[in-house]
Each structure stands twice: as C-alpha cells, then as structure tokens.
Image (cartoon, coloured by chain):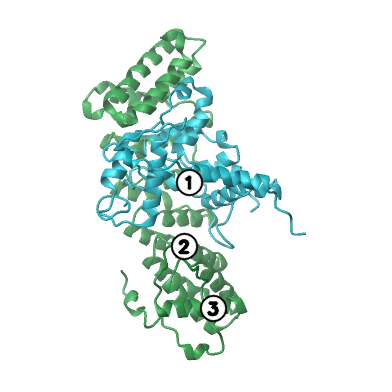
Chain colours: A cyan, B green
Amino acid sequence: MENGEMRMHTDGEVDVRGAYCAISVAKLCNLEQFEPKLFEKVSDWILSCQTYEGGFGASPFNEAHGGYSFCALAALKLMGKESLCDIEKLTYWLVNKQMKFEGGFQGRTNKLVDCCYSFWQGGMFPIIHSVLMSDSDYLQENQNWLFDSESLQEYILICCQANFGGIIDKPGKNRDYYHTCYGLSGLSVSQYCMDNTVNICENDDSLVNRTHPLFNIGFEGANRAINYFKDHLIETLD
Amino acid sequence: MSDSESSDDYDSIAIDKNEWSDLNPINQDHETNEICRIAYTENFNDVFGYFRAVLKANEISERAFDLTYKAVKLNPANYTVWFYRRILLKELGKDLNHELKLVTQIIDQNPKNYQVWQHRRNVVELLQDPSKELEFTEKILQQDSKNYHAWQYRQWVNKNFALWDQELDFVSSLITVDYKNNSAWNHRFFCLINTDHSESVLNREVDYCFEKLNLNINNESVWNYLRGLVDLMVKEGWGYPEKVCHFCNLKLESNKEDELSPFLISFKIDYNWTRAIEKKNSDANAVKEFVQQSIQYLNLLAQKYDTIRANYWKYLLSKWKQEFDQYF
C-alpha cells in the first residue's frame, strides 16, 4: 500500500502481522532479488505503531500488545531497521510484562498471564540484546537475557503442562496446538543464551532444540533455507 | 450467547442438494498423510464443496449469496468467503443496512474474530454511515472491556468520521469503573493526540493521573500514561512539568512501604537520568546527587522491591556506571 501498510489479504485487515509475514517469507526465500524496493515504506509505518507505552500495537495508536510487538520488532530487525524505534522505551515496557508472581508474561499492561506470550514477549529479548549490546560492555559480557529466565521456565513447565501432554494458557485452561507451539518456543528462547550456551532451569530432560528468534522455526533449518535461496536464484517467468 | 444462535443450528444451515444439481462440488485438497485431519461434518463439506465450485465458476447469484451466509455461519474465519460475499453484495446490489444487522449479530457471537470486524468496516465504509458504530462498540466493550478488535475498530470510526465529542467522557467512565483498564488509558491518549492537547489540557491530564495514583500508587497504566504526557510536554517545548517531579518526591519521601511502587521509583530514576545528562558538564554536585540516588534505587529494585526484573535493573546500573563513571 502507498503509506507502507500491508493487508493480510485482498481487502483484508491492515495490521503489523501482515508486514511481518510478508517480510519474513521474503527474507527466507530471498524474494527481494525481484523487487529490492519491496519494503521501502514499510519500516516507517511499523515505527508509527510504537505507542507511548513503548510496545507496538496492531496499527498506529492501537494498544501496545505482545503479539504485535514481536511482529513489529522482528520485521524491523529483518530489514535492518531495528535501531530506528525507541528501543529503551520498548525494553522498559517489555520487562514489565513479566508477572512477578506467576513468572510468565502478560500480553498487555494490567492483563493476565498467558503462556503463549512466553514467545511473543520472551522472543523479543534476543533481538533487543543484539541492539543494546553495541553500546554496552555489560551486555557483551553478560550472556543472559534481560528477563528472569528461571521464572519463565518454571511457569511453562510447572504450571502450564496439561495432564496428558500439551501446553496450556494458564492453569484451568484446555490444551491446544497454539499454546503448545508458543510455550515450547518461549522455553527455547529461555534456554539458549546469546552465545548458544544453555541455561536449563528444570531437569536436563527439559532442554528443547534452539529456535530462530526471528522466524521461530528451527535455528539450523532457518539458516539452511536462507542459504539455499541465496544460492539458488530463481529464474524469472519471462 | 444470544437468542439468535438457537435458530441457527445446523439444520437451518443445511444445504439443499436439489438446488445445486447443476454444479459439481469441489473437494478440498487432501494430503495423503495429513498430520491432523479435521473431522468436518457432512454438511460442512457440502457447503464448502459448493462454495469452492461457485468461486471457481465466478457465479454471481442469489443462491451463491445465501450459500456464503451458510458458509460464514459455519466458519466465520474463512476470509475467502467474506471476500466473495462482498463481491456478491456489490454485484447483486444488496441492502447494506441489512448486511450491517447481520454482521452485528455475527460479531456478537464471535467478538474475537478478525474477519467479521473487517467486514463491518467494509460495509460501513460503503454506507458512509457511522451512526450506529459508537453504540455498537460500546455494547461489545460492556461484555469485554478490553476487546482489542472493538477498541481498534472504534479508533477507526473516530478517525475516519471525525467523531470525537463523546470519547473523553466515554473513556473516563470506563476508567472510573476500572482504573486499571489499560485499553481505556490507551484510548485516552489516542483521543488527546487527535484533538486538543494544548498545555492547559495536558496539565489537566497530569492532575487526572495524580487523582488516580492517589487511589492506587502501583497502577502501571497511569504511570505509563503519565510518561506519555511528560514526553509530549517536553517534545512540545514546554519543559518538564515540575509538579510531576514534586509529586514523585512527595511519595518517595513518605517512606511508607506500600507507597514505594517500583513504577514510582523507576519513574524517578528516569527523571534523574534526563537531568544528569543535561547537567553533566555544568553542575557536578547535582549530577552526583542524581547518580547516588539512582544507584541506591536501582539496587533496592534489584534486591528487594522488584527482583523479577533484577537483570534489567542491573543493566541500568551498568548504564549509569558507564555514563557517569567519574562519580563512582
């Protein structure tokens, strides 16, 4: 769209998820070889979704929300524009989304914990770390993310496992694939530090494989895909 | 659950195959080794089988239109059906006010569905009639005061049709009911930015924050909103509002355990940072005070008042040390 917005589908809703989906697919499959200016105005539009709270909403002025914030930050990072947002404000908002009693994350200020935010919120920390460490000796030496990894791992593993397998939103809820996916993804982010060392807070059996913090697919697999499409330039149709 | 749901049970959404004898339904592609095959009912498969056929044939007809109704009742998240229904609405010259009534009902039953809200937006945009929209979103917010779609939609109505008059009162009433309703506070900020945000209005808003903080000092929504106000005032060139600094100092000095909200403390630290940077090369004594107080507070937060964020407070400590290391 002209101002950098992206719709989810033809005459569908405009929100930052659309930008993230388009950009992450384009980066994985090297689609910009066809259209280098594909995302020229998108970063400005994404930046306009950052609210006074520091997080990002679905569209400009919408409430700061974990899911949309992840999409915004990951999309910006994929375009190399992550430093253009107010990272300090984002970090302040984000760290305050970890619930001091439950250990998991909430999606918005003054709302309830939900295990899926283990990834949406937790997953932003690797990106933020990579930005802030360029100005900080402390973060270059300190491999842990800026949240309480132990508390998050405990919330996921102790509070959010359903009796017969699968992961749930919070105690009392039913299991589903969505919460299982994002609970495990958040667990993975917690368990792997910046330098790829592990930080297992429960027993060793709880270690999962490393997820790629921008695509949330297996780390090795993501890199293989990127390299494949870089090496195999697709012939144009004409 | 609304009354209309009982009249829309599967029988009334059932398809009459005699009506469709001229078309072959198109089956959904099935992988041979699906990880998780969905157990569709026979009726569901019929409806969508014929829908796919209608779509492929580009059929514009009343029966196609009725079919899209059945399809969205069965799966309101199927955006292709909504897309095609919008084409039919236009091509068949359908009554959009009637469509608005229909989408009202469907949103009521599926208030967290993206497609139905988008459909409403498309219909209202065509009608260019926002007269029912504020009332409608208010009704949905009465059921769930934080429904993201409702707030997002309401913001669109406000901006697109320049309907601002009711908003401040609306948001104030919600905050009165629940002063921790962050969606309401966010909407308040949105209204401010898009209407009058002169110095006197922002000062009034600061007082409003104090009023709410006096009810509960540990309300993150208010502190975030206050930060937003202060940033705005500084950006507009009116300088940092001294009464905010005064308010914080008063609360901090009261020294009552339950008054020492981590949000209050971090707000002061943030203020100190701005001031310290400002005076870095001009007033060493002042800077020293800001540094010492901030270090003390950061340690208190990391060790006592907000330990879950210890990693973050320690990072901020390192920032203070890095920037002001001559004061250590």
Q: Is residue A95 above or below residue B86?
A: above
Q: Quadrant of the N terminus of chain B?
A: bottom left
Q: Residues within 10 Å of mark 2 (few under 14, many from 20)?
A: many
Q: Residues within 10 Å of mark 3 (few under 14, many from 20)?
A: some
For numbered disc 1, what is the local secondary structure?
loop
At which x and y percent is residue A131? 52, 31
Q: Which tag is nearer the camera, tag 2 or tag 3?
A: 3
In contact (CB < 8 Å): disc 2 and disc 3: no
C-alpha gap between disc 2 and disc 3: 29 Å
Q: Is residue A1 above or below residue B260?
A: below
At which x and y percent is residue A195? 47, 30
Q: Tag 2, which chain?
A: B
Q: Quadrant of the C terminus of chain B?
A: top left
Q: Are marks 1 and 2 on the same chain?
A: no
What residue sits right under mark 1 in the picture? A216
Residue drawn at (22%, 30%) of the image: B258
Q: Are marks 3 and 1 on the same chain?
A: no
Q: Is residue B108 above or below residue A207?
A: below
Q: Residues within 10 Å of mark 1 (few under 14, many from 20)?
A: some
C-alpha gap between disc 3 and disc 1: 34 Å
Q: Tag 1, which chain?
A: A
Q: Which tag is nearer the camera, tag 1 or tag 2?
A: 1
For numbered disc 3, what is the local secondary structure?
loop
At which x and y percent is residue A216? 48, 46
What residue sits right under mark 2 in the picture? B117
In contact (CB < 8 Å): disc 3 and disc 1: no
